[in-house]
Amino acid sequence: MAELSARIAQGRGDAPADLVLRGGRIFDLITGEMLEGDVAICGDTIVGICDVYDGTEVVDVSGLILVPGFIDTHLHIESSLVTPFEFDRCVAPRGVTTAICDPHEIANVIGAAGVRYFQQASEHTLIDIRVQLSSCVPSTHMETAGAELSAEDIAGLMGHPSGIGLAEFMNYPGVIHRDPDVLRKLELFQGGHIDGHCPLLSGKDLNGYIAAGIRTEHEATNPEEALEKLRKGMRVLIREGSVSKDLDALQPLLTERTAPYMCLCTDDRNPLDIGEYGHLDYMIRRLISLGTPPLAAYRAATLSAAEAFGLKDRGMIAPGKRADIVALGSLEACDAQMVFAAGTRVNDAAFAARGSVEPVGRDSVHAPKVTAASFRATANREDTDVIGIREGQILTDHLHERIAIADGDKPPDPARDLARIAVVERHGLNGNIACGFVRGFGMTKGAIASTVCHDHHNIACVGMDYADMAVAANRLGEIEGGFVVAEGGRVLAELALPVAGLMSLEPFEVVRDRLEALRAAARSLGVTLEEPFLQLAFLALPVIPALKITDRGMVDVVKFEIIT
């Protein structure tokens, strides 16, 4: 009652506010107006606007525009390659104050312990990390993951304050064909929030999927697909990650009319891209530069996101709302000059005052030692299925090529941009190694290997030289996972990711610099992709059409079956 009484008293001006922001203008996301007056804050809550307030602390924001803190509606923090604490330090100064994450990357490696790690971390970060419960661990039956989460396991994780609902339900065939295990998971969250993931699904199949109580969709990659999903009641999350870049395609749909039902998300974005371009701030700038009205862009990044996920306590600068506030130089530049997360000013002192959680998932790489011979593609027919990369998308093409057999092997062919791709099981469960072909890297020599390999996170390796592939893959076991580039029998660059083979223990600035070195090393092999490492990771995800590879073989995602 004392806290409630204090909020009311400070809002009425009967007592000085804990904090007053003075001199700025509020961008009202309901009317589109610029509102004058102070912003009064009591603890973590806004209690007054559009008036003059006394404050125990007064911060001058003269000349700045105040907007609500940005909400990333779907992401995997693991894909930022840093811990939740370093992610917090990386994105909060850019205006992100809420991150709705799905920790299914770490869950695929170490199970429920990985989800609990994120839940515990959320209790200490400046930004509000909301931890959805991972629905599909593993994503399908066509891969070997390090762990499995059953409906009973998920039920045991419910109830933490960071929770909103069930994370992206990637196994859309399991939903529409009513797999009993799938239905048990969905049943746990009926009447609550369930995130979607159904690329290219349409018609009656889409109707059935949505009828399961699924509310959001971040996999729409073209306006027609997104519009059908909007018409059928799904909230469409515009995604712009390091690999999946859908913003330009979907931007024409985001108007002041549709903005209440559209949100923004990054899904998978690494510190190098955040450093070079930005995070949600980049998306807002880009949308406005393409002609989106600022009111629509900022609504999608804040109020619409809060409404979509039932977060009634945020999304506006208004009395009673969480004091998540970004002070900008201009709406068009989306240049955060000052950020407040739950009333705390985001700065080095605030980061230093946080608590911490011991990292988990150490020593998680237990792959067999491989040799050059491990990557031979033994076959008796020249007709070959080839994964075709679409740069900027995680969708792939199912290509068909004739590759001559030499000495019982179908070797890579740099002249036709046909590289060997392999997945090596690394959880110590069966030692599977599957090989295939991919087109689109542009590499002419050497190899790249990674333990970031969605979603099972085995070792993914692509190369033109089998010996270099072995060097890169074996090195991952020595550094507890990460990224390696090899050529000429030696390692050119590497980044160790010892937390479950997914996250670094270094500051995000160090990770960013090492990613620059890795990118340069990849280019020295002839690689033309802007983001080859995460692009490689998505080639192993068997819930995104059309052709993928896991440790069990090449997967025809359209038919949902292993073909080799």
Image: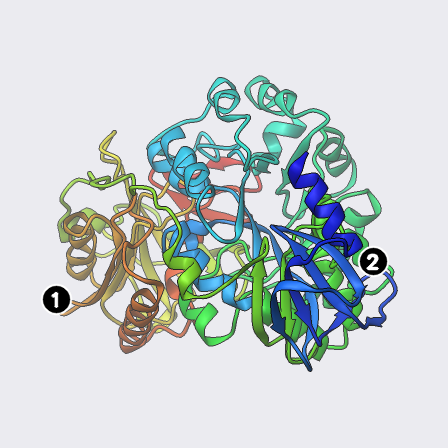
Does residue 68 appear left or right of residue 537 in this picture? right
Q: Which residue is rendered at x = 55% and y = 34% of the image?
A: 161
Residue in the foreground of this view, choosing between 240 and 330: 330
| Label 2 crowd bin: few (<14), some (14–19), many (20+), radius 10 Å | some
Image location (x, y in percent) of residue 353: 39, 54
Callout 2: SS: loop
* Labelled disc at residue 258: 2
Rendered position, 221 above or below 252: above
* Labelled disc at residue 353: none
Q: Amino acid at mark 1?
A: Arg
Rendered position, 469 above or below 133: below
Quadrant where the N terminus is found in the figure: top right
Quadrant where the C terminus is found in the figure: top left
Q: Quadrant of residue 461?
A: bottom left
Rendered position, 128 above or below 414: above
Residue in the foreground of this view, choosing between 262 and 95: 95
| Label 1 crowd bin: few (<14), some (14–19), many (20+), radius 10 Å | some
Image location (x, y in percent) of residue 220: 67, 53
Number of dots carrying numbers: 2
Q: Amino acid at mark 2?
A: Thr
Image location (x, y in percent) of residue 513: 31, 72
